[in-house]
Image: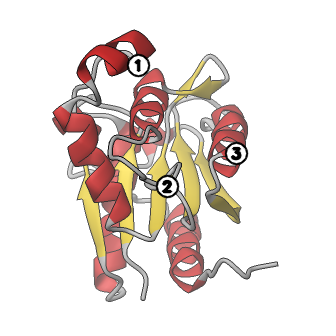
Amino acid sequence: MSRILFLAGSARQNSINKMLAKEAYIIAKHLNIQGTFLDLADYPLPIYDEDLEDNEGLPKLAIDLKKVFIQHNKLFIASPEYNSSFSPLLKNALDWISRAHEQNEPPLSAFKGKIAAITAAAPGTLGGLRGLVPLRMMLENIDVMVTPEQLAIPSAHKVFDEAGQLTDDKKRQSLINIITSLDNASRTMS
């Protein structure tokens, strides 16, 4: 059974990517798909520093975040594009939770066997598309299978209403298709 973790790579309160992740979570609930919405703003972490890790171990919030990831077998990520890459907030969170913190803990325990769908929303004409390439690469390098379907929403500030709902019917249907595909995906996808 799918248990999807929905998150955005932004801590900003009115982030369009956070709106996208929340909208995906609400759609999943309407489709009777189990999931959790997670706000990275609730997990403020220091910049990853191996000396800090060696001296103090993983921060408590990193351990808490890692536990949430471990409880879900699929990920839905809405990532803003920062200079043709994904956000430093998302990268830092993924870096911290990639680290083992218990004796005999398997490497990458927060990621092993997971499947992810990646999306982006941006005010520009490419909709954050360029940032999805390095995000896909990183996730696949840490043993997360990323679905071939992805969504980048251009001019995103025009397609979400004040309540954060996606008003563009074509984009909404694409989002539904991605969520359904993620829910049905298995590690044996070809």
Task: Provide the residue designation for mark 2.
Answer: 106
Quarter of the image for the N terminus: give it: bottom left
Q: How many marks?
A: 3
The x and y percentages for residue 41 are 22, 33
Q: Residue at x 40, y 26 (%)?
A: 89
Left or right of 94 in this view: 29: left
> In this rendering, which labeled residue sits more in front, label 2 or label 3?
2
Residue 96's label in the rendered image is none
Q: CA distance from mark 3 to mark 1?
A: 18 Å
Residue 48's label in the rendered image is 1
Check disc 2: other Cα within 10 Å, few if <14, some if 14-19, many if 20+: few
Mark toward the start of the polypeptide (2 vs 3):
2
**Local SS, label 2:** loop
Q: Residue at x 49, y 26 (%)?
A: 87
> Mark 3: which amino acid?
Asn
**Local SS, label 3:** helix
**Local SS, label 1:** loop
Left or right of 164 in this view: 97: right
**Residues at marks 1 and 2 touching, judged by CB atoms closer than 8 Å:** no
The x and y percentages for residue 73 are 45, 71
Quarter of the image for the C terminus: give it: bottom right
Q: CA distance from mark 1 to mark 2?
A: 20 Å
Task: Provide the residue designation for mark 3.
Answer: 141
> Mark 2: which amino acid?
Pro
Q: CA distance from mark 2 to mark 3?
A: 16 Å
Check disc 3: other Cα within 10 Å, few if <14, some if 14-19, many if 20+: few
Looking at the rendering, which quadrant does residue 17 occupy? top left
